[in-house]
Image (spheres, grey):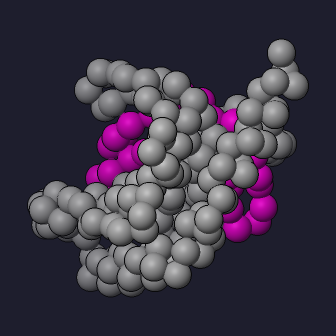
Amino acid sequence: MSLELGDRLTIQSYKHNKLLHRIWTQAKVLEYTSNQIVVANKRTRVIESNGRFWHTREPSVVWFFKDHWFNIIGMLREDGVYYYCNIASPYVIDDEALKYIDYDLDIKVFPNGSYKILDRGEYTVHKNKMHYPEKLRSILEKELDKLKAMVEKKEGPFKEGEVKQYYAKFKKQVLKKL
């Protein structure tokens, strides 16, 4: 699939056992390089594996990486930018969607820079149930450490103003289409 800036993209999240976990029906491509794709959305429909659906509450900018085992969602709320970071496989893209495997561990980052690691229990259950290989578990733990370091150093998407800058680009593209 060839991508252009401004293209709409579907995002599919899977679990290690290859079962579909969640679908975001659309996101707009803001940046596409050999190492990453940055997309944005607002009020996007999200479909869960059980068929239940909901819409995102706030605008977000999402970074997917080719060389990191995580993705980063920056959410714009009235009281500041929050981040939800998924420990996940590097993305692949085909004619259907951008796809990745979600490995349960998450980091939630608050506007003041503090953060909390989430879903250790879910990770433990799934690593045993789905038999995550030792090499994979080691990669996931190292990537979790890299992600924490990025948060603490305010690098990449965590840099002050980064999410708002990309969201402004998104709004400009949307207005251009009207």
Left or right: residue 149 compared with residue 52? right
When the figure is inspected, residue 93 is found, relative to residue 28, above or below; the finding is below
- 100 vs 27, nearest the viewer: 27
- 33 vs 56, nearest the viewer: 56
Left or right: residue 109 compared with residue 32? left
The image shows a total of numbered marks equal to 0
Left or right: residue 118 compared with residue 152? left
> Where's the N terminus, which quadrant?
top right
- Residue 11 appears in view: no
- 101 vs 133, nearest the viewer: 101
Residue at 48 percent across and 39 percent down: it is 78
Residue at 68 percent across and 55 percent down: it is 37
When the figure is inspected, residue 122 is found, relative to residue 115, above or below; the finding is above
The spot of residue 32 in percent (x, y) is: 77, 54
The spot of residue 156 in percent (x, y) is: 62, 70
Residue extending furthest toward the right: 176
- Looking at the rendering, the stretch of residues picked out in magenta corresponds to 10-38
The spot of residue 82 in percent (x, y) is: 44, 52
Residue at 72 percent across and 51 percent down: it is 165
> Is 11 a magenta residue?
yes
> Where's the C terminus, which quadrant?
top right
Answer with the quarter of the image where residue 86 lies: bottom left
When the figure is inspected, residue 21 is found, relative to residue 25, above or below; the finding is below
The rendered magenta stretch, by its main secondary structure, is classed as strand
- Residue 162 appears in view: yes
> Is 144 a magenta residue?
no
Residue at 68 percent across and 43 percent down: it is 167
